[in-house]
Image (cartoon, rainbow, N blue to C red):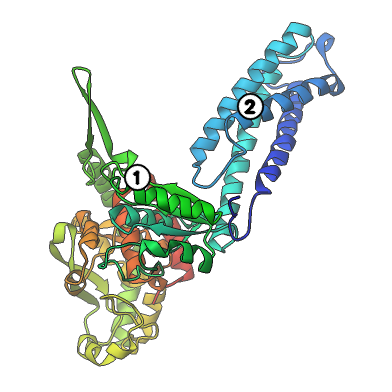
Amino acid sequence: MNKGPRTPLHWLRFVVLALDIVLVNVAFGLAYIIRYRLQWFRAVDPAYYTDFSAYLPFAALLTLLLISAYAMEGLYGEQRGRRFWDDFYGIFNGTMTGLGITIIIVFFWRPLFYSRLIFAYTAVLVITLLSIERIILRAVLAWLRKRGVGVARVVVVGAGELGRMVMRNVVANPDLGYKVVGFLDDNPGKTADIGPIRALGSIDRLPEVLKTEDIDEVIITLPWHSYRRIMRVMAQSERAGVRARVVPDLFQLRLGRVEVDTLNGIPLIGLREMQLSKHQLIIKRGMDVVLSAFALIALLPLMGLIALAIKVDSPHGPVLFRQVRIGKNGRPFHLYKFRSMIPEADLIKQHLKDLNEADGPLFKIRNDPRLTRVGRILRRFSLDELPQLVNVLRGEMSLVGPRPALPEEVAHYEPWHHKRLTVTPGITGLWQISGRSDLSFDEMMLLDVYYVENWSLLLDLRILLLTIPKVILGEGAY
C-alpha cells in the first residue's frame, strides 16, 4: 500500500465535497430570493408565486445530480498539479450536465410548477460560488504546502536534462506540494549537490535511500533505452510501498514544445524553438516600454530625493553606479544602479572573501561593511535598482527575466546554466519572488531556466504583482 505525504491531506476531498453541497444549496437559496423576492428582470405573476418549501425536493435532486457530475469530472480526486482552469471547466461542465438532467426530470413531472428563470440564476450562482471556493482552497493549500503540510518527499532517479527539468519545476512551484530530497544517478560526473537537492549516489542505492530518507514518491527520469532499469526501479519502489512514476523520455520533449504537422496525411512531430516567438517578443517589449516609461515619470521625484540622500551621505562618490553585466545571448552591457557602497568597494572586496555567505560564483554578505547608511536602506527595499528602468527602455533589460550576471559568474557556468542567457535579463524574476538572496546559486539557476522554458505573459504579470509585497517587506534582500 502506498504511503502518504508527511502530513496527509486525504481529508481534503471530504471537506471540499461538504462545502460543495452547502454552496449548491446556498446558490439555489439565493436564486429563489432573486426570482421571487427581488424579482430581477421579470416580475412574478401572483398566480404563479411558489413557496420555498415546494422547491426543497428540487434542491435535493439538484444537489445529488451536481455532486455526481462533479465527481465524474474528477473534482474530488487528486488535486496536486491541477490547474484552476481545469477546476473551472469541471465545475462548468458538471453544472451544465447536472442542471440539464434536472430540468428534464422536473418539467417532465411538473411542467408548470417551477420558474424557468430560477434555473439560469442557479447555474450562474453555482459556477461563481464553487469557482471562488476553489480559488480560496488553492490559496490555502499553497500556504500549507509552503510550510511543509501535505508535502511529499521525492527522490529523482536520473539527473540528466529530464531529471533537472523535473527539479526545476518542483523548485519553481512549491505550492504543488513536492520536496525533492535528492537524486540518484550512475554517472560519476553527477555527484555534486544541486542547491538543497542532494546527490544520493548510484541508482543501486535506491532501496537504502527509500528506507533512510523516508521517501513518499520516486520520479524516474531515465532515458527510454533503460527499459530494464526502469522496471527494476519500479519493482523496488513497489516492494518498499512507495509510489513510482515515470517521466516519458520522448526525445526529452515537454508537451508544450511538441509541434505536430502533416504531410499529405503523414503526421510530422517536431520541436518548437524554446526562444520566444516574434509576436511574444513584441508583446513583452511593448509591456516593458509602456510600464518602465510610466514608472520613470511617476518615480522621478523619489529618484531625485534618493540621489540627494546619496550625495549628502557619501559626497566623494558618484550617485549612479555603472557595472558591466552579461545580457541576452552573452552580450555585455552597462547596468545602472544607485550607488549603495563606498567608492572603494571593489578594492576592499578581495579582503572580504572569507565573509562571503553565497555559494557558487556569487558574492553576498548579509551585513556588508562596504554599504553606506543610505545604501543599506536602498538595498533593503531594492530602491538601488530603480535606474535599471533606463536599461529597460534601452532594450538591454526587461522588467521580468533572469537577473543579469557578472562576467566572472558566467565564466563558471555549467552547460545547462547557459540556457538562462537565451532571453533578455530582467529587473525582477522568478527567484526574486521565491526567496531572493536566501536561495542557493543552483536554486536560482533552476528557477531562471524554468522561467525561460515556461514564459507567458501571465507569468510575467504574476511575477510583477508578487514582487511588490516582497519589495515592501524587504524579504530576502541584502
> 3 or 230: which is nearer to us?
230
* Residue that badge 1 annotates: 457
Please state if 188 lies on the left or on the right of 138 as rendered.
Answer: left
Given the image, on which type of amino acid does mark 1 rest? Leu
> 96 or 7: which is nearer to us?
7
Secondary structure, mark 1, is helix
Location of residue 301 (image quadrant): bottom left
Between circles 2 and 1, the one closer to the viewer is 2
* Residue that badge 2 annotates: 69
In the rendered image, is residue 428 in sight? no
Q: Residue at the location (47% across, 65% down)?
A: 209
Q: Residue at the location (19% across, 89% down)?
A: 347
Percent of width and height locating residue 316:
22, 89
Distance between the alpha carbons at the discs numbered 2 and 1: 33 Å
> 109 or 375: which is nearer to us?
109
Secondary structure, mark 2, is helix
Percent of width and height locating residue 23:
71, 36
Please state if 87 lies on the left or on the right of 108 as rendered.
Answer: left
> 306 or 97: which is nearer to us?
97
Quarter containing the C terminus: bottom left
Given the image, on which type of amino acid does mark 2 rest? Ala
